[in-house]
Amino acid sequence: MTIQIKICGLSTPEAVDRAADLNADMAGFIFFEKSPRHVSIGTAATLAERARARGLKTVAVTVDMDDDGLDAIVASMKPDWLQLHGGESPERASVVKARYGLPVMKAFAIRDASDLTRIKPYHGIADRFLFDAKPPKGSDLPGGNGVSFDWRHLATLDGAPSYMLSGGLTKDNIGEAIGISQAPGVDVSSGVESAPGIKDLGMMNDFVQAVREAEVAQPDQGRSQE
Ligand SMILES: O=C(O)c1ccccc1NCC(=O)[C@H](O)[C@H](O)COP(=O)(O)O
């Protein structure tokens, strides 16, 4: 099984095109004003159209956003997925999923194995989980911090939930991360940037190549992702 790759925080046509050239699966667009990766709805709509035309699934990344904000994003960008990267409750995730008829990826900040127990009430609501690290002290950002968590915690997951491993992944650690976690999908943002918010096309190449090498070196031990 091929490991799915999401490249997040895209903000230029060049980066979208490179993600498509590299056969990444998902392109994430950040709607969070404090983020160096924040894009306006208009920019996201243009880039998402370009991404879709090249076969990428588009993801609108939002943080505790209200209906008005989501209505505007969905109407204009027409994302394939909604990523909920805040403290959205299972009830809120369920309402969002029903309101837009779109698959929902719920992000969780992980430090200890016990943090993974928080996914339980979202089973049957979230279509996919995204496991990210807890933001470091003083960070204004719930994601995109370039920080990893201990991937061994993922061994405590019950069943085989559909998820993406995220947080501080780079070309240098992704092989080990995949080996330890057996993650069916991976997500990267700052690990393919030359500076906050600036995607580096060469680093994108290197990251995707490292994922593909890890797939060959560490054949599938039961990964699955719809
Ligand atoms: O990336 C951001 O700036 C961001 C801001 C607010 C909410 C979520 C954000 N990113 C979400 C992602 O899916 C990132 O790819 C994920 O946190 C991993 O980031 P990184 O550790 O930089 O690879």
Image (cartoon, helix red, strand yellow):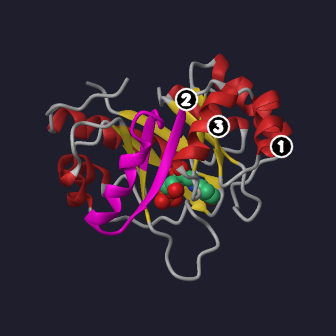
Q: State the residue position of label 2.
A: 103
Could you say which disc has been placed on residue 217 in the image?
none
Q: Is the residue marked 2 within 8 Å of ligand 1, measured from its CB? A: no
The three-letter code of the residue at mark 1 reads: Asp
Nearer-the-camera pick, 27 or 73 = 73
Find ligand 1 in the image and state its quadrant.
bottom right
The three-letter code of the residue at mark 2 reads: Pro
User: Residue 170: x and y, percent?
Assistant: 39, 55
Q: Is residue 67 magenta?
A: no
Nearer-the-camera pick, 10 or 85 = 85
User: Residue 76: x and y, percent?
Assistant: 82, 30
Mark closer to the chain start, 3 or 1: 1
**Inter-mark Cα distance, 3 to 1:** 12 Å
Mark closer to the chain start, 3 or 2: 3
**Inter-mark Cα distance, 3 to 2:** 9 Å
Foreground: disc 3 or disc 2: 3
- Residue at x 56%, y 56% (from the top left corner): 193
Which range is magenta?
A: 104-130
